[in-house]
Amino acid sequence: MMDFSTQIEFLKQHSTYAQRWLNARPDWVDWLNIKSSQEIDLSGIQELLSPCLLAVSAAEHNEAQFMADLRLARQRLMLWVAYRDLNGLADLTEVTHALSYFAQEAVNLSIAYIRRDLGERFGLPWSADRDAEMPLMVVGMGKLGGMELNLSSDIDLIFLYEHEGETQGAIKSLSHHEWFTRMGKRLIKFLAEHDENGFVFRVDMRLRPNGDSGPLVCSLDMLEEYLLVQGREWERYAWIKGRLITPSPESPAFTTCQQELDQLIRPFVYRRHLDYGVIASIRELHAQIQREAEKRSSAHQGRSKDIKLGRGGIREIEFLAQMFQLMRGGTDPRFRIRPTLEVLDLVKLQGGLSVKEIEALKAAYQFLRRLEHRIQVWEDQQTHYLPEDGAARTRLALSMSAPGKRQDQSAFLMELDTHQAIVAQLFEKAFLLDDSARLDTGLLTLGWQPDELIFPESLKRWLLWMDSVKRRQLPEKSQLIFSNLICKAAQSLQEDNLAAGKDIALLRFFDLLEAIVRRSAYLSILSEYPKALLNVLALMRTSQWGAEYLTQHPHLLDYLLNSRTEIALIEEPEQYWQEVSSTLNLRLDDVMSSGDGSEQAMDILRVTHHTETFITLLADVGIGVEQALSVEKVSDHLSTLADLILQTTFERVWPSVAQKFGIPKEPLPPFAIISYGKLGGKELGYASDLDVIFLYQAKEGDFTHQEVYTLLAKRVINWLTTYTSAGSLFEIDTRLRPNGAAGFLVTSTDAFKKYQLREGGNAAWVWEHQALTRARFSAGSKDVGFDFDAVRSEVLSQKRDIGALRFEIEEMRRKVHAGHPNPGTDFDLKHDAGGMVDIEFMVQYLILAHAHRFPQLVANLGNIALLRIAGAADLIPLDVAQNVANAYRLLRAHQHRLRLDGAEKTRVNLRQEPKLIEARQSVLNLWQELFSARPEI
């Protein structure tokens, strides 16, 4: 490690600014020696500014001295930062945070100083709503907002105040607007005016409403009106970084001011849907900035390489990060952050770009920011141009080297070119700067229409569309995009080697386009991303249900852009669902933190369910994955999703119920949701109802708790079934509770146990014990879940009269069959003899008849696993068990595919399905074996 004297010389060698100040203030060298090994943090900055803090509360004010102290503190900070940065002692975060902390502390101290003077002369602005002093709200924009200031940054500020009024507390009063304008002007003077001690920060106020032509300060009402009426697209990008730096977080007014500002800015910046229209907007803004950068570079000899605004520069990395923020920040609160590197980490986590691409962008960003600091610290100038002078470049190469190492100019320039080339390449890829990769939205060839031989029905649809009023009412751009998308889709389908389904796929695509034609953001996805269009067409051909689902929920188009999400679901399901849960709760916290956000929360639950259902669907039909999911895996994922929705709903509904009854919200109550049927057996389909019951722990006869939990259950059902703007979640069936529809909606665990064990006059039927074989704890209190599991195990393990059990199950099977008549000749995969219901009834019989001797049958493992257990226990022959298990898998797979293609009844012509004939026969044989054989079976 180099000694201090060597490090000081290195600082002077690479900064004439530092050299001047250390020559003028030699005592600062000793101060730097003390501070050299100390990381620059907020306490160190406050120590530098301590003379200013004392001046705020001093009996007499000396404005000139305050300004001098502020400037000298700034020069010492700059030397401290430059010393640690150049000598490799501070990382980029320490440097940018130190400068940003200093800026906000300097702003707050200056305001405190000015406030005292203005208050004595004109009184103070007063908030009628809060009955408290009204502060000047200072919003740090740009790099200050993102805690990313560089060594010679100006600071972008916007001055706001809550509302109009008159100051109070002095003989003479001013309007709030005049009072804050005076404060704003003096604040700029305190920070930006040059004297013999330099300046603190250059202040840029051009990001305020109406820029230089607008008032210096504006009320929140004025800001709201401006954003609604005049707010421009580029201002959305600017406000991403906006951060309230005054009043400070310790101030009593901070929370109110923050909330009021957030309510205005959030809907302006972040759309409630995925916003792909932002891609074209940023692309246009970037082109404009690059033209300006090139114009400035060409006008100044020796300033040809702008590392900030030029190709592959810092701004392109920031634009990339902001693109993801603007697209996703409306639906995912995690993207509402400011630091560029943190955004890139989140993009990596979400799979927006690959790990390799993100790491390359982060490395480039840190390299370019370090280089930016070294260019600026030479003369404390706000510049981003790489000098042409060879000696200057050699000096920069040396300053960019690792401590103790020397890098020559050619190696340095090669590293710079490599970083910038990667950034430019990734930027061009993300913003589709290659026109050939995007959809041609020009006029179609005169007379183009779908080929009648391949697309007969689509041609009719096309002709109707071209002559429709709806088409003529669209903007010309939307008409062109629609026509070109149909043309491109027809060409893609025509070139596809698969012969069948082309016409129906194009018809389904018509349905989708007509549903989204007025939503420019969705059209942008299909027109900007060729891969999305190809994946949409693959879905249209594969699944009618999937095509209709996408048409109903077009925001899901986003998930056709890349397959990283499906891959994560398949490869790391546990981690995947944890991430889904944490993201869901983050979004719910966001909307429920400021009052009753139940309606928004219900929408978020629905959108989450739509999204995860669709991701499972894509993996199911093989889009974006090497191998499609099996039907068992599909059901596993859908069941996990349903459990997650149930648990989250329970957790979010409970606080309102607790509040109504004056009960503590924490901990969560002893209440559980028990699932039966498809969800209970983890065989859930895409549109399955949920069969559930509600259990709670309480003493028998405790009607108070019954009232509380009845309301809780009703609200849970309401959240799950209400149709909102985002649709609905599930149909809920609670008729499997004790006494069915005539029974209480909620049941205590003690009462449930007595009912199931037939300990009173009110007793469960055999079919209810059959249903219990496929029941499990899905959500709520795990303690109640354990109680349920114990009751279930005890009930299923009872010794039963085999003859009576056979009779009851056969009777129930006859009733089910009668309830689903099949007048045709096609085989009903589920309900006909030899179908899935027969297999389910046989498994239930084996459990109820033999679980008292073979407790391994009690576990809710699914029909296939339980058949194997029965075979291993010699209750049925092993080969028969395997054959029936295979039959069940085959029947489920056929049923699943028919459902995906929109079939209401899952019936097939067996003459065309020899494997199904064999499978059905194996089921019929086992039924005969179990229900017509000797009594002990």
Image (tube, rainbow, N blue to C red):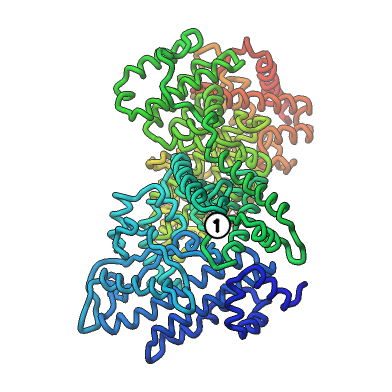
Q: Position of residue 442 (x, y in %)?
A: 43, 24
Residue ranking furthest to the bottom: 59
Residue 733: x percent and y percent? 47, 39
On screen, residue 501 above or below 761: above
Extreme residue toward the top, this view: 453
At 58% from the left and 21% from the top, the residue drawn is 829
Q: Quadrant of residue 860?
A: top right
Above or below, comparing residue 191 to residue 169 in the picture: above
Residue placed most toward the observer, 162 or 583: 162
State the residue at coordinates (41%, 41%): 726
Residue 334 in view (yes/no):
yes
**Residue 588 at what x, y percent from top left?**
47, 53
Q: Is residue 81 left or right of residue 732?
A: right
226 lies left or right of 5: left
Amino acid type, mark 1? His
Give the quarter of the figure containing the C terminus: top right
- Residue under label 1: 384
Query: Viewer-proximal residue, 417 or 558?
Result: 417
| Residue 758 visible to an observer of this rendering | no
Name which residue lies at 53% across and 16% down.
Answer: 502
Of residues 549 and 195, the one nearer the viewer is: 195
Q: Residues within 10 Å of mark 1 (few under 14, many from 20)?
A: many
Q: Quadrant of the N terminus?
A: bottom right
Q: Secondary structure at mark 1?
A: loop
